[in-house]
Image (cartoon, helix red, strand yellow):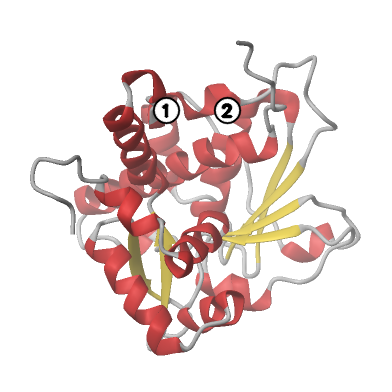
């Protein structure tokens, strides 16, 4: 118990300091995962993992979404933006000079062109390749320019892109993908990727293996085409989906383009 009048550690510090919760945060920082996957990765009983997940959810650091592949299951997702603000607040509570980068400037931590490693190749997948994965492809290309090779594909591609996917990218980000057409995952057989990122719970279950043992990540993003009953509701769902994917892309950016550690000069 902290004596009266003594500084109390910020909530994020108290939560993250526990070994199991830190492991959960670390695993979820890489990919959305199900409870049984977290149990295997953390090496703790399911009831203990579920208990700590409840604490993290209560703090707003972790949220859960029902799987679109199996409605009896859920994917857990770490809210990296909320974590960034919590970390910044914790640093500021200790000393103003320790305030961390805000979420809005996280992508500025990437390398310069002179420092950048070989161009990472990234594949985004979803079922229809008509909304989520082409939105992710367009946004990563928008943020990374020619520093990454980016493509997307689907397990059951639609005949064309969803018009609201085209519309939201044009209106919100000034990106035009109207001339793009969905492609099938089979057309990429034999290709080598550094990262394969699924945005759909269904495609995660059927995504084929690729050469080079790519790093497999999962972002459990609901299909925006199921987001509303009217045209207005439908566009709003695509707007929310694009915003979520853009946030995830901004936090992927430093992973693709890490900044070399530099010693702090006295």
Residue 100's disc is: 1
**Mark 1 and mark 2 residues within 8 Å of each other at the beta carbon:** no
Mark with earlier residue (1, 2) = 1
Q: Which residue is identified by label 2? A: 142
Q: Secondary structure at mark 1?
A: loop
Q: Is residue 178 visible?
A: no
- The residues bearing labels 1 and 2 have C-alpha atoms spaced at a distance of 25 Å
* Secondary structure state at the residue bearing disc 2: helix
Q: Which mark is residue 135?
A: none
Residue at x-position 18% and y-position 59% = 1
Circle 1 crowding by C-alpha within 10 Å: few under 14, some 14–19, many from 20:
some
Tell which of 154 and 249 is nearer to you: 249
Query: Against 262, is 89 above or below?
Result: below
Quadrant of the rendered structure where residue 116 is?
top right
In this rendering, the label closer to the viewer, 1 or 2: 1
- The residue depicted at 52 percent of the width and 40 percent of the height is 251
Q: How many marks?
A: 2
Residue 88 location (% of width, % of height):
35, 32
Q: Is residue 242 above or below residue 64?
A: above
Label 2, residues with CA under 10 Å away: few <14, some 14-19, many ≥20: few
Residue drawn at x 35%, y 61% as measured from the top left:
62
Looking at the image, which residue sits at the far top? 266
Query: Residue 218: x percent and y percent?
Result: 57, 62
Q: Position of residue 94 (x, y in %)?
A: 32, 31
| 238 to the left or right of 33 | left
């Amino acid at each position: 118990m902290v004596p009266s009048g003594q500084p109390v550690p910020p909530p994020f510090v108290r939560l993250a300091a526990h070994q199991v919760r830190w492991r959960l945060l670390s695993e979820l920082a890489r990919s959305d995962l199900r409870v049984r996957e977290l149990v295997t990765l953390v090496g703790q009983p399911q009831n203990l993992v579920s208990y700590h997940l409840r604490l993290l959810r209560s703090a707003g650091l972790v949220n859960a979404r029902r799987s679109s592949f199996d409605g009896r299951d859920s994917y857990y997702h770490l809210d990296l933006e909320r974590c960034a603000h919590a970390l910044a607040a914790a640093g500021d509570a200790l000393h103003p000079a320790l305030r961390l980068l805000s979420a809005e400037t996280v992508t500025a931590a990437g390398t310069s062109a002179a420092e950048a490693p070989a161009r990472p190749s990234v594949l985004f997948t979803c079922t229809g390749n008509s909304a989520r994965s082409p939105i992710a492809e367009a946004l990563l290309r928008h943020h990374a320019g020619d520093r990454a090779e980016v493509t997307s594909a689907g397990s059951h591609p639609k005949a064309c892109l969803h018009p609201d996917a085209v519309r939201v990218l044009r209106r919100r980000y000034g990106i035009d993908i109207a001339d793009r057409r969905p492609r099938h995952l089979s057309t990429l057989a034999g290709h080598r990727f550094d990262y394969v990122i699924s945005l759909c719970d269904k495609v995660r279950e059927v995504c084929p293996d690729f050469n080079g043992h790519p790093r497999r990540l999962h972002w459990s993003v609901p299909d925006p085409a199921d987001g509303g009953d009217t045209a207005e509701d439908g566009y709003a769902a695509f707007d929310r989906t694009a915003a979520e994917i853009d946030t995830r892309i901004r936090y992927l950016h430093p992973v693709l383009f890490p900044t070399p550690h530099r010693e702090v000069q006295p």
